[in-house]
Amino acid sequence: MPTESATFLTEYLRAIEAGTAAVFAGAGLSMAAGYVDWKRLLADVVAELKLDPDTENLVAAAQYHVNERRTRGRLNQLLIDEFTKDAEPNPNHKLLARLPIETIWTTNYDILLETALAAEHKRVDVKHRQPQLAISKPGRHVTLYKMHGDISSPDEAVLVKEDYETYDEKRKLFSYQLQGDLVAKTFMFIGFSFTDPNIDYLLGRIRGLMSQHVRTHYCFMRRVSKPASNAGKILADYQYDLRRQQLLIGDLKRYGIQTVLVEEYSEITSILEQLDRLVYRSNVFVSGSAEEYAPFDQPRLDALCRTLGRTLMERGRKLTSGLGTGVGGVVILGAMEAIYRRAAGRVDDRLTLRPFPQELAAGPTRDAMWTRYREEMIGRAGAAVFIAGNKRVGGTVVVADGCLEEFEIAKALGRTPIPIGCTGHAAAQIWNEVHTNVDTFYPGKASEARTALGVLNDPASADVQLVEAVMALLELAGGKR
């Protein structure tokens, strides 16, 4: 991993854990969902003015249009036409919404962030007008500051040159709030090309607000690509663009903004996925059920589950469980014993209990709901431990398809599977796949992982050995807390 990315992940993760992380989202975040940038938004306006969209200050061009028309009605309609089109949050929206970040700023007018946050069942307090800053929504999880307005009020959107010039008259409370956040929080700037027409206005405002109080922030920027051809003009253009980028990176440091260079914008998604895994690395999801206890007997499986729950708490982990029959409840019992005995925080802070709702009749509707339920639980964990995994259908004991689905979800979300294979059933099947593909599940740590997995599949392993092997794999998966 490049040093820039590693530094960002380390420092920004620290800010998230301290509750001092914030996001600042620009137009590029929504472009990937199908919305336009400023150049495309104002293409017809600029053409009508007989100006060059590649060289013209588009904020100024929007102002020229208003000057000519004596109204901004057409611009308001453009905003409505473009930013009310059907669009779905993209992976970066969804990843940002999943992170436990309470403060988000954006210059975007669309509602994709609100949509992504709502999908995560987060209560969002949206601020796009000054009076809203004085009122707080009860029980909010996230405050979203739309400092340039919202598509619901296009006539109030910050769009033309005059809007920027009078910003501190009409929206000065946003400036005050942003100033406080820039001093107190570590920002991730995402979706800014730093060639957007409004970026100079934004950075100028930030610099003026911060004064000498410069905190370290981070932004993503695509590295200037070296051309395949060394032809004179092509090479000269590349060298010019590269030098300009280097100067811009140096200038951003005046604002406390450190640049994370990427080769392709898709790398930003990969970095956010890594951040997502790191944020939840201490959370462990336990999957399992047991109508039939063989190859163990009930007392031994109970003892193993109880020891696992207790050890997870003693080692500073958090636990999520759907309370699978014969497994989940006993794991929770061990965890609660450790919490109460050691006064290791509040139960609500250490345990997330999500028993599956049973009221719906079996069928596609329930299956879809339970899949979503599993995705949410596993998505908030760094690893998933699998124990036994069987159920009774009629008079026959079969492998629990729910456990297998949870394994597939863990794989899809990049969560580390830890199967205790010697408990049999679904866990044994999962162990076989993980052991066969250990390099995939534990990249760069296959040798150590293979040793611990061997312990987890050995029926002669004592309970304490099995639990220590689980803890070793947790450390390989996400590092020590």
Image: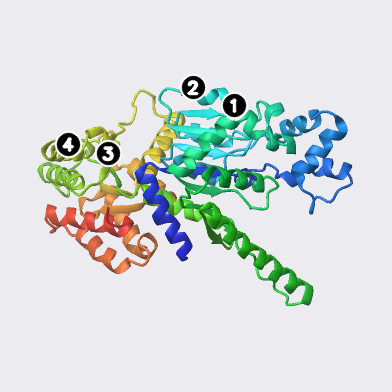
The spot of residue 283 in percent (x, y) is 30, 45
Total numbered badges shown on the rendered structure: 4
Specify the amino acid type for callout 2.
Ile
Which residue, given by chain and number where applicable, does mark 2 sit on?
Answer: 135
**SS at circle 1:** loop
Frontmost of labels 3 and 2 is: 2
The vertical placement of 457 against 357, above or below, is below
Bin the neighbour count of mark 1 within 10 Å (Cα to Cα): few under 14, some 14-19, many 20 and up: many
- In space, the residues marked 1 and 4 are separated at their CA atoms by 46 Å
Query: Decide: marks 3, 2 in contact (CB < 8 A)?
Result: no
Name which quarter of the figure residue 146 lies in: top right
Which residue, given by chain and number where applicable, does mark 3 sit on?
Answer: 391
* Left or right of 460, for residue 233: right
Specify the amino acid type for callout 3.
Lys
User: Is residue 28 at least partly visible in the picture?
Assistant: yes
Which residue, given by chain and number where applicable, does mark 4 sit on?
Answer: 336
* Left or right of 285, for residue 4: right
Sequence-earlier tag: 2 or 1 = 1
Sequence-earlier tag: 2 or 4 = 2
Sequence-earlier tag: 3 or 2 = 2
Q: Nearer the viewer, residue 179 or 55?
A: 179
Which residue, given by chain and number where applicable, does mark 1 sit on?
Answer: 129
Sequence-earlier tag: 3 or 1 = 1
